[in-house]
Image (cartoon, helix red, strand yellow):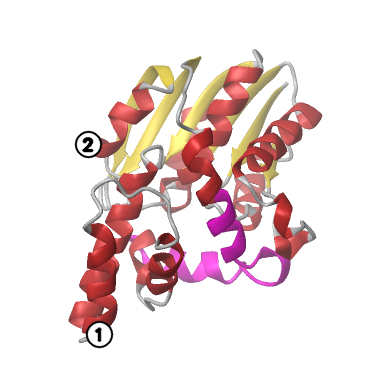
Amino acid sequence: MTRVFYFHGGPGGNSTFERALFEKLLGPNVYCWNEPSLKRGAKLDELNYENWLQSSLNFFKKNKSDKNILIGHSFGVFACHHIALNDDSIDKIILSAPASDRKSSERNIFNFCAEDFLNNNDIEKANKLKDYLSDKELNYDNSLLPAYQIALSNEKLFNRYFYDPNHLQQFFSTQVGEFEYDVDALFNVRKTWEVASSKKNIAQSKCIVVFGENDPIVTKENELKSLRSMFSNLEVKSFEKCSHHPHIEHSEKFLSLIN
């Protein structure tokens, strides 16, 4: 029996919305991972990229069948890649708006946040983000924390993540309690990602990549070079009227790629 595994984006995120959606559309053989989080009992010193990867692999190995399909959203591409390198039971990988070129996606986020601040006459925040963007390498250092804090203060930030405002409202209605966004996990996993992800082996599993044509965070042009350094067998698709969550905004069309 084929089992489907979902690995959410972030860092700092969770799968609570997708669990309900996928179980409704696919039935019970869907396994949705939640990363270690302070909101769910993890300790601060446990929040790092290596533990993040190991958690995803442990979850998969505990629940896998003889035939398995992985779905990864955004930063979840790294969990899917890691599992595919460490297990030979993967039949297919389906990626939703993968953020494999992390620095490119960060640059895009900071750029549109700076634009929003300018449009709102918040010149100070716009200029601070532009100062950070002037670093062409975008290496992680102590300036990344305040840059992200500024971006997260943008009230319109997550409006860009969904093409349809109704999907935005539905998604965030589930992000409460232990499923609140964990900013500490974002910072701590991200700052330890830099070195750990510098060397990549290529996974051989069939991989379907879905981009949203209205996604301002990841773009096909920026991602394909990085993805080809991670996966050897790529099939690329684009969904119209879709931003950073193809698996939510066009869920039935997206999940049809399983078959």
Residue 158 falls within the magenta-colored stretch: no
Q: Where on the picture, by quarter, is residue 207?
A: top left
Which residue is label 1 attached to? 122
Q: Residues within 10 Å of mark 2 (few under 14, many from 20)?
A: few
Residue sitting farthest toward the bottom: 121
Residue at the location (53% across, 34% down)? Answer: 196
Does residue 243 appear anywhere in the picture? no
**Along the viewing direction, whichever of 185 and 145 lies nearer the viewer:** 145
- Left or right relative to 46: residue 79: left
**Along the viewing direction, whichever of 14 and 19 lies nearer the viewer:** 14
Residue at the location (24% across, 75% down)? Answer: 126
Start-end of magenta stretch: 162-189
**Along the viewing direction, whichever of 49 and 95 lies nearer the viewer:** 49
Residue sitting farthest toward the front: 142
Q: Quadrant of the N terminus?
A: top right
Sequence-wise first label, 1 or 2: 1
Residue at the location (80% across, 30% down)? Answer: 62
- Left or right relative to 216: residue 20: right
Q: Amino acid at mark 1?
A: Asp
Q: Tell me residue 61's x, y (percent).
A: 76, 27
1 vs 241: above or below: above
Q: Tell me residue 110's x, y (percent).
A: 30, 62
Which residue is label 2 attached to? 221
192 vs 200: above or below: below
Residue at the location (62% across, 26% down)? Answer: 83
- Left or right relative to 11: residue 179: right
- Magenta stretch, main secondary structure, is helix
Where disc 2 sits, the SS reads helix
**Along the viewing direction, whichever of 107 and 84 lies nearer the viewer:** 107
Q: Tell me residue 229's x, y (percent).
A: 38, 22
Q: Amino acid at mark 2?
A: Glu
